[in-house]
Amino acid sequence: REIRLGDVSTFGPYLKYFHTFDAGGLIEDWSEAGYNLLKEVGGADSLYKSWKKEWHVECDGGNVPLEEKAAQYFVTRAEDYLLIPLFELANHRNGHMNYDYVNKRIEVKDGVGADGIATRQIPAGQEIHHSFYLCPDCGLMRTNGHGTIDLLRNYGFIESMPQRWAFSYNNEDKETYITFDLDDVHPEAPTGELDLRWFGEGYQPDQVGVMVLQKEYERLVAKASLFQNNRIIQSMSKHEFDVASRFYIARGDALTKAIQVATEDIEKADDQIEQAWDRRRSPEETTTKYHRELIEWIRSHPD
């Protein structure tokens, strides 16, 4: 109703921003080729979320393009079930690791409104950010592994650092999760210099988990040729290809760092166990151990 009123509407300035909104940013509105490329990168991770089902079925919404655009805007910008002018202009970024990108927190008063409160000094001209899933009122999203893939699924973008990644696999009929946060070593660090922090106890991979990550990394590497195929590139919009490319690079970086750190952690733990075991051995046992190793080495080097 307010949109149709145009400049006469009390919300005229706000609606001008609405008209700049790109209604094709959500994955569901991508071309088939773009969505298929994204699925090739995501592998077993589901990237499908239907705003159309929510709008047409659950909300009994219409098919008029303007109404559908308003529904898309609501899905990507609303705080729960409210659109709050100025509030939704702030974009997402986390700030829980090495550098405090977040400079604002939101305090929501149900059914009344929301307060945006600066969490630190904000220099003039600096963009205002708040976290879409680590905010004080974000509930289970703070602890259930919600992160980079979920933002892509729900909003259509790849979050900047820091990122949160979660990979799951079945280990002896038990669903097991590998979850970690990534951040630049420092804000001006060269690309690839990343710091990793495991999400918590039980989320760090064991040797089986490392093998799962390695297998996923090898699967991902095998998809590199898709991004050099001109037929595939030309079958989708530049925006779709750019997002899929960023997803490919981000996922590869996350897997590479996780494999590296997990392998180092396992080797360090094995060394500690071996040292502790050596301290418990008698001198005779230690001598016998070294003797066996020497014999094995001689046998393996006959020349």
Image (tube, rainbow, N blue to C red):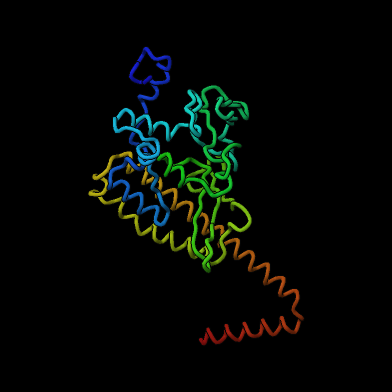
In front of the other: 217 or 143: 143
Can residue 216 be seen? yes
Find residue 223 and report its horizontal and vertical position in percent.
34, 56
Instruction: Tell me where residue 187 sits by quadrant.
Output: top right
| Identity of the residue drawn at 72% across and 71% down | 276
- Residue ID at (26%, 51%): 229
The percent coordinates of residue 281 (x first, y second) are 74, 79
**On the rendered image, what quadrant is the N terminus found in?**
top left
- The residue at 58%/57% (across/down) is 203
Q: Is residue 104 visible?
A: no
Residue 97 is situated, as x and y percent measured from the top left of the image, at 60, 43
Where is 271 relative to 15, above or below? below
Instruction: Choose between 170 and 95: the one closer to the eye.
Output: 170
Between 283 and 219, the one lying in front of the other is 219
Q: Foreground residue, 46 or 267?
A: 46
- Left or right: where 203 falls relative to 244: right
Counting every numbered tag in the picture gives: 0
Residue 72 in the image: state x and y as whole percent. 38, 34
Residue 189's place in the image compared with 6, above or below, is below
72 left or right, relative to 107 = left
